[in-house]
Amino acid sequence: MSLISVVLPCLNEIRHGYLPRILDNLAQQSGEKQLIIVMSPSIDGTYDVITQHPAADQFKLIDSDATNRAQRLTVGIEASQGDIVLLHHPATLLPPDALSQVRGLMANTMLTWGGFRHSFDFDHWLLRFTSWYSTTQRPRFSRILYLDHCIFARREALMAIGGVPDMDIFEDTALSHALGKFGPPCIAPGTIVTSARRFRERGIYKHAALNQLLKLMYHAKLDPKKMNWLYEGNSQINVNYDEK
């Protein structure tokens, strides 16, 4: 179980400001690894940043016509060769020893999936609470991890459930529900750092309220496309509706 495949989905990632640091972080991760980048048609400099990175020879770049993040992740899972696959959020930084932590945890054959402790790149009491809740409470009681925890799982389990559910939003929740049938998620000791950009742009309290509204809409089984339009507005961060 030495090889870990990392799948990074990309769509116009320059705006996040995270891509160069993610590539640096992945390149320096220790141990045997397969770094897969699945990129949908992008109109910014995402392609150039990836192909001109000093460690570009470490990255397997897959051009895809996938129209949402779930599809990009599934393309990467299907191309993966590792026993463990880590699904990398495109605006999140892993701990420097993330892959070593995953190897240590998943040496326990009773464990099927998990993620990392959560934190935001902006300090606010509500964001600290959100990170605490999503690390210690939600996975324990609901068996749910969001993608910005950088979910990792055994490849055979991901293939058994058909990859990431093809949804424009809440694909990580649906994925957690599917993986949760194998058991609860384990939490790695390291902490990821994820972008709080949505909270800062929309307003922390307003965005937090929107998140709760969207959860109610999800449980009411409303149209994911409509929910994602409400979530993303015109930014089309995870989904390119021009291609749909």
Image (tube, rainbow, N blue to C red):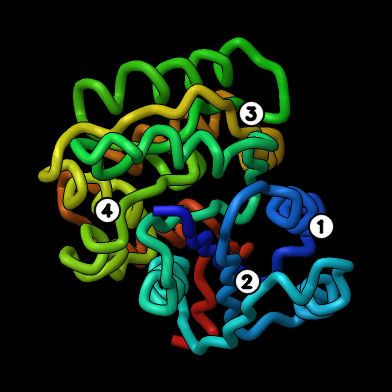
Q: Residue furthest left?
A: 181
**Is residue 101 among the parts visible in the rendering?**
yes
Image location of residue 168, percent across then percent down: 38, 65
Q: What residue type is labelled 4?
A: Leu
Q: Which residue is drawn at 44% across and 86% down?
A: 244
Question: In the rendered structure, which disc, 1 or 3, sits on the residue that comes first in sequence?
Answer: 1
Percent x, y of residue 242: 54, 85
Q: Is mark 1 on a helix, strand or loop?
A: helix
Q: Which amino acid does label 1 sit on?
A: Pro
Does 244 sit above or below residue 213? Answer: below
Instruction: Give the side of residue 33 with respect to residue 155, left or right.
Output: right
Where is residue 107 drawn, in percent x and y? 34, 39
Query: What is the distance, in whole Å, between disc 1 and disc 4 at their CAs?
Result: 27 Å
Tag 3 secondary structure: loop
Q: What whole-number distance in Å separates the C-alpha atoms at marks 1 and 3?
A: 18 Å
The residue identified by callout 4 is 175
Residue at 54% x, 76% y: name it.
240
Mark-to-mark CA distance, 2 and 3: 21 Å
Amino acid type of disc 3? Phe
Tag 3 residue:
120
Q: Which of 225 and 84 is in front in this view?
A: 84
